Amino acid sequence: MAQQDPKTGKEMQQMSRKRNLWVLGLIFGFAVLIYLVTILRMEG
């Protein structure tokens, strides 16, 4: 994955927002995974 240098402040904000959304998605996905594993372990 090639990183581009932002040319303007606006581009920098857009890149930062994209990265933040990816991190948020990963954290949310991890939380759901932990929740599901916990529920499955309680049943069994």
Image (spheres, helix red, strand yellow):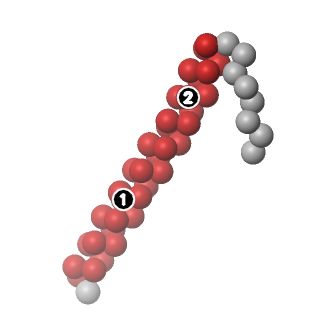
Secondary structure category for the residue under label 2: helix
Q: Residue at x 69, y 21 (%)?
A: 6
Residue under label 2, please give it.
Answer: 16
Q: Residue furthest front?
A: 5
Q: Residue at x 26, y 72 (%)?
A: 39
- What is the quadrant of the C terminus in the image? bottom left
Would you identify the image quadrant in which residue 35 lies?
Answer: bottom left
Label whose residue precedes the other's in the sequence (2 or 1): 2
Q: Residue at x 50, y 36 (%)?
A: 20
Q: How many marks?
A: 2
Q: Residues within 10 Å of mark 1 (few under 14, many from 20)?
A: few
Q: Is residue 40 left or right of residue 24?
A: left
Q: Residue furthest bottom?
A: 44
Where is residue 13 drawn, in percent x and y? Answer: 56, 21
Secondary structure category for the residue under label 1: helix
Tell me the number on the disc at residue 32.
1
Where is residue 7 drawn, in percent x and y? Answer: 72, 16
Q: Is residue 8 left or right of residue 36?
A: right
